[in-house]
Image (cartoon, rainbow, N blue to C red):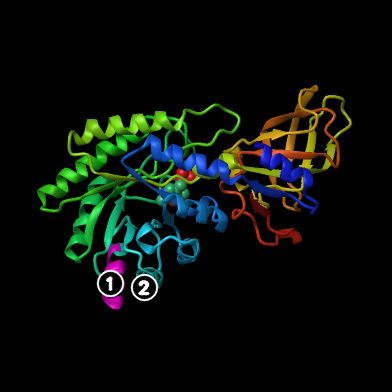
């Protein structure tokens, strides 16, 4: 946690859980990505945290933006970036949203099947938009990732060749290939296999007279939670080596789409202990600790106990025992850590404030709007 966040929380006087994001950390992260992958353009994955202050900061630093919806595009445009710095990276789009994106000036689109290509081609005809670039997302198994994104997005590499040819035949620019190695990817080598597949697609398309230009390396860059993670430089180095291995001296244009790695470590959630209790009177029975935030209030990534946050309490360093950690709603799914209980100090009490670290990504907009009458997570960018 940064000194600025500490000071903000010390003087905060409103009630309820809140997320505080330090924009200096986001600036450092952006510069680190730019340094570690020097020939790669950065498209920040807006869905990780769409706070207007963060989008404005990244726009000013020169970042581009990967968006999932027209609403995200509008946020990016309002933050001061131009449409030529925006991609529509969602492979699942309504045709009328594609048309709206084209009207806003966006020209870079993800696809993973022929039907999606045809939607773009029709929207292009409707709007008269020209020079539309499409890239085809390929499947990636997500091994090594703590929050895998496999199956739902992408197609088999052999099919990508057909999809790109389909785009080319429809007058679109068959621009390249994309993949996502899974979010919170701990293995710096995870890009190798997908880059081998990408190079094969480039070769096959070239044989059909279609010259691809770009590989979109996706996100996956991790945030430090409880376990140590490799540095961004190690990812940059490994990716550069894999590009050289598979593309030789014809390295394509590349982009990355960091979400978690850009904002995760910039945010801290302050929450309150609402109740500490036991389910029986037995001496060694596990304690249940209920916070005023849970799965529906912003900590959705505790689903299946996938992401394990670092939690600080005012009693750190004192004797601790395993606890089940749960949220405040009347829904029995609102339990965060039970399969692997979480060690917390014995003296942790009702009313104590706890800090949940590394929560700058996938929290503020991952909260229910008014489930059980709890307001959505408050968010401050300082
Ligand atoms: C969510 C998403 C990202 C960001 O992934 P992180 O693992 O958070 O970096 C990047 N690209 C696409 C297409 C995404 O859907």
The dot on residue 325 is none
Residue 170 is one of the magenta-drawn residues: no
Tell me, yes or no, if residue 147 can be seen here: no
Q: Residue at x 33, y 43 (%)?
A: 40
Q: Residue at x 72, y 33 (%)?
A: 312
**Where residue 63 sits: x, y (%)?**
42, 51
- CB of residue at label 1: within 8 Å of ligand 1? no
Look at the magenta stretch and give its main secondary structure.
helix
Q: Are marks 2 and 1 in contact (CB under 8 Å)?
A: yes
Q: Residue at x 24, y 32 (%)?
A: 244
Q: Which residues are magenta?
A: 117-129
For the residues labelled 2 and 1, the Cα–Cα distance comes to 8 Å
Crowd rating for badge 2 (residues with CA inside 10 Å; few <14, some 14–19, many 20+): some
Crowd rating for badge 1 (residues with CA inside 10 Å; few <14, some 14–19, many 20+): some
The dot on residue 129 is 1
Q: Quadrant of residue 77?
A: bottom left
Q: Between 276 and 250, which is closer to the camera in this rendering?
A: 250
- CB of residue at label 2: within 8 Å of ligand 1? no
Q: Secondary structure at mark 2?
A: helix
Residue 126 is one of the magenta-drawn residues: yes
**Where residue 196 sits: x, y (%)?**
25, 36
Q: Quadrant of the N terminus?
A: top right
Q: Between 39 and 235, which is closer to the camera in this rendering?
A: 39
Residue projecting furthest to the bottom? 126
Q: Residue at x 34, y 38 (%)?
A: 38
**Where residue 117 sits: x, y (%)?**
28, 63
Side of 311 relative to 186 (left or right)? right
Q: Secondary structure at mark 1?
A: loop
**Where residue 315 sits: x, y (%)?**
80, 29
Tell me, yes or no, if residue 235 can be seen here: yes
Which residue is identified by label 2?
A: 103
* First-in-chain label (2 vs 1): 2
């Amino acid at each position: 946690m940064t000194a600025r966040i500490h000071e903000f929380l010390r003087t905060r006087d409103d009630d309820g859980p809140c997320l505080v994001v330090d924009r200096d950390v986001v600036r450092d992260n952006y510069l680190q990505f730019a340094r570690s992958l020097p020939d790669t353009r950065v498209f920040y994955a807006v869905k990780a945290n769409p706070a207007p202050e963060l989008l404005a900061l990244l726009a000013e630093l020169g970042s581009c933006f990967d968006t999932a919806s027209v609403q995200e595009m509008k946020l990016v445009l309002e933050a001061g970036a131009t449409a030529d710095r925006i991609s529509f990276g969602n492979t699942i789009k309504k045709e009328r949203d594609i048309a709206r994106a084209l009207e806003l000036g966006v020209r870079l689109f993800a696809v993973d099947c022929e039907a999606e290509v045809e939607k773009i081609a029709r929207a292009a005809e409707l709007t008269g938009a020209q020079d539309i670039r499409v890239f085809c997302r390929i499947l990636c198994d997500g091994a090594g990732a703590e929050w895998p994104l496999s199956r739902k997005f992408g197609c088999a590499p052999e099919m990508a060749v057909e999809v790109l040819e389909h785009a080319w035949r429809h007058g679109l620019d068959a621009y390249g290939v994309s993949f996502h190695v899974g979010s919170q990817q701990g293995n710096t080598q995870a890009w190798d296999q997908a880059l081998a597949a990408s190079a094969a697609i480039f070769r096959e398309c070239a044989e059909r007279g279609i010259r691809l230009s770009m590989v979109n390396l996706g996100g996956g860059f991790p945030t430090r939670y409880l376990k140590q993670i490799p540095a961004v430089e190690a990812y940059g180095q490994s990716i550069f080596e894999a590009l050289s291995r598979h593309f030789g001296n014809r390295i394509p244009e590349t982009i990355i789409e960091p979400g978690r790695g850009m904002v995760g470590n910039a945010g801290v959630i302050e929450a309150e202990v609402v109740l500490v209790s036991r389910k029986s009177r037995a001496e060694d029975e596990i304690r249940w600790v209920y916070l005023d935030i849970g799965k529906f209030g912003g900590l959705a990534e505790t689903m299946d106990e996938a992401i394990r946050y670092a939690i600080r309490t005012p009693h750190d360093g004192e004797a601790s025992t395993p606890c089940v950690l749960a949220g405040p709603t009347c829904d029995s799914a609102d339990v965060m850590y039970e399969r692997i209980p979480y060690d917390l100090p014995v003296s942790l009490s009702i009313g104590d404030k706890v800090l949940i670290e590394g929560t700058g990504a996938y929290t503020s907009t991952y909260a229910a709007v008014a489930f059980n009458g709890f307001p959505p997570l408050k968010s401050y960018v300082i």
